[in-house]
Amino acid sequence: MKNQFLFPYKLKKPALVLLIVSLGFGFLILLFDNSPDFFNILVGEKLKDGQLVPKYLNIGDTLIGSLLILSSLIYAFSREKNEDEYLQKIRLDALVLATYINYGLLFIAFVTIWGFDFLSVLVFNLFTHLLLFIIIFTILKLKMNRSLKYEE
């Protein structure tokens, strides 16, 4: 059974590298509460004290967030080397479980966090579903591989 909706297997490793890099940069931006200056781009000029001064925009959050979404999406939904129906069932089970966990955590956040802090929760929620899926799918694959080795 050929599934048309999965990315090719050859994209899995480059997507993993981009995922790790974007997670690293994302945590650094989160930790230091600011994007590095090399993410600044010149967008025009603004008037300050009667003089035109360059206006810069830091695109670090946008760039890292976009890379994180794209790399995790490609990594999560790339074919495996030996894709079969059982692996597709595991993929579906992992997706369902990740959805339950993600929305369970979001529900808890809805009833416990208010105000401006909730905006941070929503931003994190953009990434948690795919990351939870990747973690759960990897764990279920490892369990499957161990049980297959145990049976041999």
Image (spheres, rainbow, N blue to C red):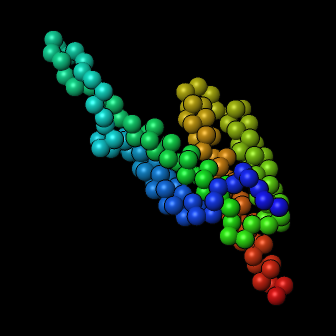
Q: Give the quadrant of the C terminus.
A: bottom right
Instruction: Residue at 84%, 85% (x, y): give it.
Output: 151
Which one is nearer the viewer's eye here, 21 or 121?
A: 21
The x, y position of residue 114, in whole percent, is 62, 28
On the question of residue 145 being in view, the answer is yes
For the N terminus, give its image quadrant. bottom right
Residue 87: x and y in percent read 78, 65
Q: How many marks?
A: 0
User: On the picture, is 15 further left or further right than 32?
Assistant: right
Q: Residue at x 74, y 41 (%)?
A: 103
| Left or right of 130 in this view: 152 | right
Q: Quadrant of residue 79?
A: bottom right
Residue in the image at 77% along x and 56% along y:
3
Q: Position of residue 36 (x, y in %)?
A: 33, 44
* Side (left or right) of 39 relative to 141: left
- Above or below, comparing residue 119 to residue 25 in the picture: above
Q: Residue furthest bottom?
A: 152
- Residue 71 place in picture, x, y as percent: 55, 52
Q: Is residue 141 above or below residue 3?
A: below
The quarter holding residue 56 reads: top left
Is residue 33 visible to us here?
no
